[in-house]
Amino acid sequence: MRTTVENVMTTDVAAVNKDASFHTVAELLIKEGVSGLPVLDDDNRVLGVVSEADLLAKEEFKERYYGDDYRPPLRARIRHTAGSEGSGYRKSLGETAGALMTSPAHLTTADAPVVSAARLMDRHGVKRLPVVDAEGRLIGIVSRRDLIKVFLRSDKDIEQQVREAVRAGTAGLDVTVTDGVVTLSGTLAEHSHAITAVRLAENIDGVVAVYDTIAWKHDDIVDLPVWGGA
């Protein structure tokens, strides 16, 4: 059984309403020691995420526009609003979480495999994902640090799951686990059984690596027909 987001997520989540003030957001970010907060509507549905970077846009554009007492003409400010920097400029004018946030947020669900959450974080370059129910309401949050927890499973638990996963057709297989590294040894009836055992072990959450010295009595891989051959 694969580890899901529900197994590692945090349910005590710091979040803000869309109408929360700039000061409230900043204060909560500092108090909770996090770099981002889910932004919710009045029904607890996730609208977006407000981050430290979103708040810092105010200082960034203030310095860019008003440094050395220079204020660009209205036409230039409108151009920034409409151009590639428009999002940052609009955030620099924001006074509430709803105006400051990045939306839509990248979300996951409690039943999603942790590997899916990890891929989503990597794809979008984010450090955490709000976890929502079927109605889009916030029920938790999962961070990169939470996902690492799967590698803290005990060797005993991993060994048991490997044995259960490779049970069929693998009588005579020996399984040992040390610091998450699985070693498979012994003699199996078929070459294909050895390959399957290794692949099944590799797919178990918490497994760092798989080494095998499995021997087999019959190389059924060689005997497989080559489709499309002469």
Image (cartoon, rainbow, N blue to C red):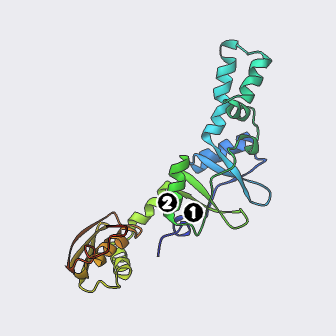
Q: Which amino acid type is marked by label 2?
A: Asp
Disc 1 element: loop
Q: Quadrant of residue 101?
A: top right
Q: Give the CA separation, mark 1 to mark 2.
A: 8 Å
Q: Quadrant of residue 131?
A: bottom right
Q: Quadrant of residue 27?
A: top right
Among the two numbered marks 1 and 2 on one chain, the one whose residue lies closer to the N terminus: 1
Image vertical order of residue 158 relative to residue 114, above or below: below
Residue at horizontal 39%, vertical 64%? 151
Residue at horizontal 75%, vertical 22%? 77
Between 36 and 174, the one nearer to me in the picture: 174
Q: Residue 111, position in %: x, y? A: 58, 70
Q: Residue 55, position in %: x, y? A: 66, 37
Q: Are marks 1 and 2 in contact (CB under 8 Å)?
A: yes
* Residue under label 1: 10
Q: Which amino acid type is marked by label 1?
A: Thr
* Residue under label 2: 146
Q: Residues within 10 Å of mark 1 (few under 14, many from 20)?
A: some
226 sits left or right of 115 in the view = left
